Image (spheres, rainbow, N blue to C red):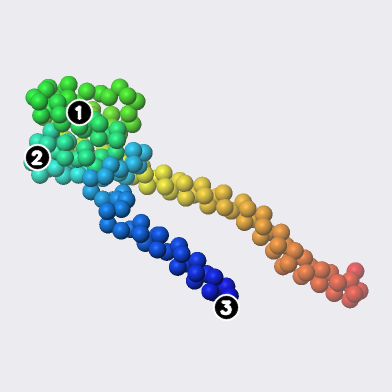
Amino acid sequence: MMWAAALLAAAVLVLPRAAGARIPGGPRSPIDAGTPADSDDPLAVAATLDVFAACLRAGMAVSTAAAGVAGSAPAPLAAVLRRAADLLALGADAGQAWADPHDGSDSHVRAVVRMARRSAASGAALAQGVEDLAATLRADAADAAGARAERASVLIAGPLGLCYLPAFLCLGIVPVVAGLAGDVLWSGVL
C-alpha cells in the first residue's frame, strides 16, 4: 500500500510537467509543416523530393516549386533548392542555377542537381527523375534498417546463448543423465 501511494505521488509530480510540454505554442513537433527536417534522415529527403515532384507535376515552375519545398527540406538540400529558386527567379541560366555544390553535400543532393541540369539541357521531365530518386532513397533506408535489425538479432543471440545454454545443460540435461546413470549403475548392467 505504501508503494502504491509513493508511485501515485511521483506520477502526480511528474505528469504535469510532461503534459505542459504539449501545450500549444510549445516546442513544435518534427512533423509540423515548415520545420526543417533532420539533415541525415534519408526519409526526410525522400519526402521532400516527393513534394517537389508533386509540385512539378501540378504545373508549377521549377523556381516556384523549389522555393516552396525548400522551407521544409533538410539543410543541405534546402540550401541548394533556395539558391536555385532565387537564381531561376532572377532569370539566370539553369546550368548556373543548378551548379554543383562544392561543400561536400550528400550524394542525393548532387543527384538532384545533376537531374535538374540534365532536365534543363534536354527538356526531359524533372518530376519523374525526382520521384525515382525518392523511391531509391526509401528503398535504401529500408535495406539499411533491415540490415541493422539482422545485425541486432545476431548480436542478441550470443549473450542469450551464453546465458541459457549452460542453464539448460545444468537444469535439463545433467539431471536426466545423472538419473539414468544412477539407474544403470545400480541395476548391474555395467
User: What residue sits right under mark 2 in the picture?
Assistant: 60
Residue 18 visible, this orientation: yes
- Earlier along the polypeptide chain: callout 3 or callout 2? 3
What residue is at 24 percent from the left and 30 percent from the top? 80
Q: Nearer the viewer, residue 133 or 32?
A: 32
Mark 1 vs mark 2, CA separation in Å: 17 Å
Closer to viewer: mark 3 or mark 2: 3
Secondary structure of the residue carrying numbered label 3: loop
**Dot 3 crowding, Cα within 10 Å, few <14, some 14–19, many 20+:** few
- Find residue 141 and report its image quarter: top left
**Dot 1 crowding, Cα within 10 Å, few <14, some 14–19, many 20+:** some
Q: Is residue 68 left or right of residue 187?
A: left
Residue type at mark 1: give it: Arg
- Find residue 143 and report its image quarter: top left
User: In the current view of this chain or complex, which residue is farthest to the bottom?
Assistant: 1
User: What residue sits right under mark 1 in the picture?
Assistant: 83
Residue type at mark 3: give it: Met
Secondary structure of the residue carrying numbered label 1: helix
**Dot 2 crowding, Cα within 10 Å, few <14, some 14–19, many 20+:** some
Secondary structure of the residue carrying numbered label 2: loop
Give the percent coordinates (x, y) of residue 14. 45, 62
User: What residue sits right under mark 3 in the picture?
Assistant: 1
What residue is at 28 percent from the left and 29 percent from the top? 110
